[in-house]
Image (cartoon, rainbow, N blue to C red):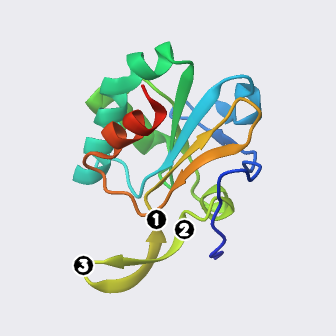
Amino acid sequence: MSEHKLAPGDKAPDFTLPDAYGKPVSLSSLRGQQVIVYFYPAAMTPGCTREACDFRDSLSALAAAGTTVLGISPDEPAKLAKFRDRDHLTFPLLSDPSRQVHEAYGAYGEKMLYGKVTVGVIRSTFVIDPDGVVAKAYYNVKATGHVERLRKDLGI
C-alpha cells in the first residue's frame, strides 16, 4: 500500500484494465486528448452513483472540449456492467480488483470514514494532459459537487 501521491507535472502511470465488457482499455491509447481518470470505491453505492451520473450528465460538454472520462474501481466487470446499464453510463468503467492502478495513483490507502481511520479506496480524480502528464490531481474529493468544481477548474 503506497502513500505516494501524484502531483501536477508527474508522468501519469500507464495502465491497461478491462472495461464493463471485459475489453482492455489503455491510458496510452488515449494520448493526444485530455483524459479525466477518477477512482471511486464501489459501483452502485449512493455517492459513487451520484458522481458517475454527474460525469455522465457532463459528458457532452467534456467531449466537446476534447476530454475523455474513465472511471476506475475495484469492482469486477460484471458488476460494472450492471452499474453502467442501471444508470445509463456512457463512458468506460474500468475494473482494478488487484488495486494496482489505484496504488500507482495513490488512490488506495488510509482514509477517514465516519471519524475512523480505515484502509480503502480514496476517492480521487486526475486530469491527464494529451502528453500523458498529470495536469491536476484531486484527493479525498466529495462525490457531490466534484464534477461541477472540476468543470469550473478546467473552464468547461
Which percent across, then down, holds residue 151? 40, 33
The reply to whether dot 2 and dot 3 touch (C-beta < 8 Å) is: no
From the image, tell me which residue sits under label 3.
Answer: 114
On screen, residue 37 above or below 67: below
- Counting residues from the start of the chain, the first of labels 2 and 3 encountered is 2
How packed is label 1: few (under 14 Cα within 10 Å), some, or many (20 or more)?
many
Q: What x and y, as percent, mark residue 30?
A: 70, 27
**Residue name at image x 44 percent, y 39 percent:** 153
Residue 122 image label: 1
| Residue 141: quadrant of the picture | bottom left
Circle 3 crowding by C-alpha within 10 Å: few under 14, some 14–19, many from 20 = few
Mark 3 element type: loop
- Quadrant assignment for the C terminus: top left
Do labels 2 and 1 touch, CB within 8 Å? yes
Q: Amino acid at mark 1?
A: Ile
Q: Which residue is mark 2?
A: 108
Badge 3 amino acid? Tyr
Residue drawn at (49%, 17%), measured in percent from left and top?
63
